[in-house]
Amino acid sequence: MISGLHGLYDDRIYWKEACSLKNCGFEVIHVAVGQKDMDFMSEEGIRLIQVRKQKYFNNPYLDILFRRLTCRPDVYKTILHVCSQIKADVYHFHDVQINKIGKQLKELEHKPKVIYDVHEDYYELSAANRPKNALIFRLTQWYAARISRKEKSASRSYDAVIAAVPYIAEKFRKYLVPEKLHIIFNYTTMQPDRFIEYHKKSYDAVYSGLMNKNRGGLEIIESAALIRSKIPGIKILIAGPVPDAKYFAGMKRAIKNLGLEENVILKDPVPYQEMEKLLLQSRIGLAIFMPVPIFYFGIQVKTFEYMACGLPVVCSNFGNIHKFISGSGAGISVDPHSPRNIANAMINLLTDKELYDLCSRNGISAVRKQYNWASEEKKLVGIYHKLFMDDNRQTVSR
């Protein structure tokens, strides 16, 4: 496994894919980028190698420009060197930037297989984080479009491309023969066998994961002020990183100005292996995403984690997230721009026990029957077995 932007213990890369392959008998190594060089064996028996990358600017585009103008060392060349020393049978890489060395991985002397795992559409991800300056926005969009074209072109030389959602798969379909293109959903590994009684839970609602302007932080805070008039002791937990310092300051300012210090709690990110315990302490799961393209077509794994832990979900009323929640009857969809709609949905769930229990049961059932990682693990292992079978056939034919 190789990643450029995800950590060593990323939930999809490490806790799902790497652990699944390890449990099925494969020797697994994860090479990632971080703040210091590391090489060690994890408790799960997976070798973790981290390659140091010096960060000069928080803005990734300025960081890239500075590196090129000043001829700074390229971390991806270092990754290529590390991978060439490992001599793996399969290089399974994540993150669009690693396409820079994708063909070189394929051309290594020992003739490995190469898999590209596409989590998100790079162009639309760039558009979702639109800078205010119009010129910078146009430049970043031009750059993102250029990278996306190169990504699709490079994919032709790989042995397999895995897409996290059908929408991404469609972007690659005209570049690949059908047997090279696969879809592996980022469903949850969580299936708790014990639940905490409703009245013993610590939080009325929780949002887990990365927070920014497109993920409803301010709207959730404003909804808390409205809920408090009906439920004075309302407690909402927002657990996860907020990389945008200005947005984080705005969230804290809103909490203070609305007098919500006892009602909205901001918490640091929780390690993946502790997330289930946190969710079980909560009553409702929040998935308030703004209507940008990446959220129309993407699948947010937190949705299925909420459902697995019996949390009715209050989510945005569009795209895949609406389809999953409304289709399974696991919660209520709302206008993400409307704190009042968000507040009303939470009040309904917290005051109507019959509705709450129905949504809770529906979510648990949907995950256990369909939206679980076990079904996707079979697909992943099948791809690996097929690659080795094809390799054996070629050896016999020669």
Image (cartoon, rainbow, N blue to C red):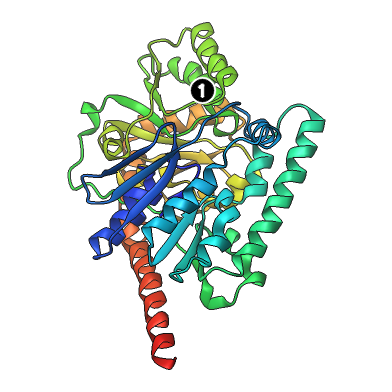
Q: Position of residue 117 (x, y in %)?
A: 49, 58
Q: Is residue 226 above or below residue 282?
A: above
Relative height, residue 271 to residue 222 (above, below): below
> How crowded is the residue under tag 1: few (<14 C-alpha within 10 Å), some, or many (20+)?
some
Residue designated by label 1: 223
Q: Quadrant of residue 99?
A: bottom right
Question: Residue 394's spot in the image, x, y percent?
Answer: 44, 86
Which percent across, then down, holds residue 281?
27, 31
Instruction: Look at the image and tell me whether residue 268 can be seen.
Output: yes
Q: Secondary structure at mark 1?
A: helix
Residue 86 screen position, x and y as percent: 37, 57
Residue at image point 54% right, 68% down: 158
Q: Residue at x 43, y 92 (%)?
A: 397
Q: Which is more toward the observer, 323 or 61?
A: 61
Q: Is 251 left, or right, of 201 in this rendering? A: right
Of residues 268 and 151, which is closer to you in this image? 151
The N terminus, quarter of image: bottom left
Residue 18 vs residue 4: left or right?
left
Instruction: Give the residue drawn at x 67%, y 48%.
Output: 123
Residue 33 picture quarter: top left
Amino acid type, residue under disc 1 in the picture: Ser
The foreground one among 67 and 31 is 67
Which residue is farthest bottom?
397
Position of the C terminus, as image quadrant, is: bottom left
In this rendering, the answer to whether 163 lies above or below 189 is below
Relative side of 39 to 195, left or right: right
